[in-house]
Image: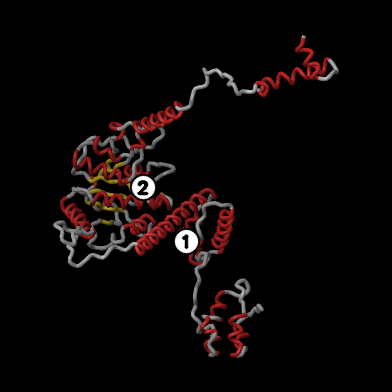
Amino acid sequence: MLRFIKGSATILRLSENLADTLAKNVYICKEVFPQQIIVNTFHRKNILHSHNSSAFCTSTTHAPEIEAPSDEPNIAEICGGDPDLEHKLKVLILEMEVLRQEGKAIPNNSSMKSENWKELLNLSSKSARKKFLEFLFKVEKKKENKQKKKEFKRLEWERNPKPEKEDNVLNYDLGGNNIFLRFYDSTINHMYNNRLIQSMQFGQKLVVDCGYHENMTKRENSNCAKQLMFLFAENRSSDDPFDLHYCNVARESSLIKGLHKFIATMYEPWFPLNLHEKSYLDVFPKEQLVYLTPHCRDVLKEYDHNAVYIIGAIVDKVSNEPLSLAKAKKEGIRMAKLPLDYYLEWGAGSGKSLTVNQVMSILLDVKRTGDWNYAFRHVPRRKLADFQLQSAVKKFKSRLSYTSRIPDKRNSRWKPNSNTELDKLSFNRINKNAVKDEIENKSGTSPLLALKRTSNK
């Protein structure tokens, strides 16, 4: 028998003798009672079977608060008490539910962070929101697949553990009876950081302008932060790295916050990276500065080892405005662009824009070798005409090999076999039907008799 209880006050009036009966017969509907009442009413089955009334029925003030994971976002944290944003957020949640019911790639609400909800509120068009939600869905599935792979490896390791080695057998692994020493990741990091410290004393300076975060979207800022991380990693792995100076750094910007997620120790005093909140004009002499921008006319034909080159940390996927050119003109700094057109033949429809880390890698090779042809190996091949021509030829050859296997029936004539039934051919059926209709129209006799007469004639 199912009995619905509407609170803990009713339970307090029940006798201790009914505790076992209630534990077996009472059913609490989750739609009627909130979860907090259920938690405060019943703890565990062993407590229900005890005859201590104080242990069986507890007060809400002494009961432990167990919060279950909720799919609903924290509206107060996201909206900050703004009623318009709260209404917009609720509409977005309904929109996501409709898209989810339609089978679209929509992530779970529990997997979305507060930053994701805030960015979703800033997107005005529905198509932009769908693209952003699809991106979050892919990230969520990648995390799930990664967790599944970890669990699968753990189970495989438990099923097939490593065989235990005997004590009297020599161990020839790394760290054992071996002439080769193990190099740990910490040792490699110390070596790379030592190179950067030496470049701070004797190396050439390279400035990265981080003052374009207001001109980029949230996703462009995150992409730019990843490029800055790659720039730092590729620079310190070089034999002769640059002395990097990140100028116009705003620590509260999404660009620097994204970079801090990749490099967690970047604010430590011992970390070999120069971060300046002020401009590069306050750090270096103006005569040594050369701003690298693709929109100017001056071409950097010869590399200057005494100059301080500036790379603009900007990712512009839509408008491609000459922001770095305008900034260099406003500040009166020399400008130059890489001689890409002199050494490369660009493909049709491919942009000439390069990432921040690719520009730095080109400068590293030019500084070390002085050969622009060798340095431009960092330009993606998909942007070049040779690669597009090779891909077109490869596609044509694949189509040609496929069509060559298909027999050519244009010059071949059809010949009937001995098993071919001539009466069932399509043209014979058409001719017979036409003859039948013509005979029926001319004579009212049976079409079979008329057909025999015409054949006898």
Judging by the rendered image, the residue that carries numbered circle 1 is: 111
Give the residue type that dot 2 points to.
Answer: Ile
Q: Is residue 87 above or below residue 290?
A: below
Residue 66 image position (x, y, % from top left)? 49, 75
Q: Secondary structure at mark 2?
A: loop
Q: Which mark is residue 233?
A: none
State the residue in front, 300 or 1: 1
Write down the quadrant of residue 156 in the picture.
Answer: bottom left
Left of 207 or right of it: where is 13? right
On the rendered image, what quadrant is the N terminus found in?
A: bottom right
Look at discs 1 and 2 and give the one toward the viewer.
Answer: 1
The residue at which mark 2 appears reads as 314
Quarter residue 414 falls in: top right
Residue in view at x 60 percent, y 24 percent = 419
| Residue 433 drawn above or below residue 322 | above
Residue 223 is situated, as x and y percent measured from the top left of the image, at 38, 50
Q: Earlier in the sequence, mark 1 or mark 2?
A: 1
Quick one: 435 or 6, which is closer to the camera? 435
Q: Residue furthest left?
A: 179
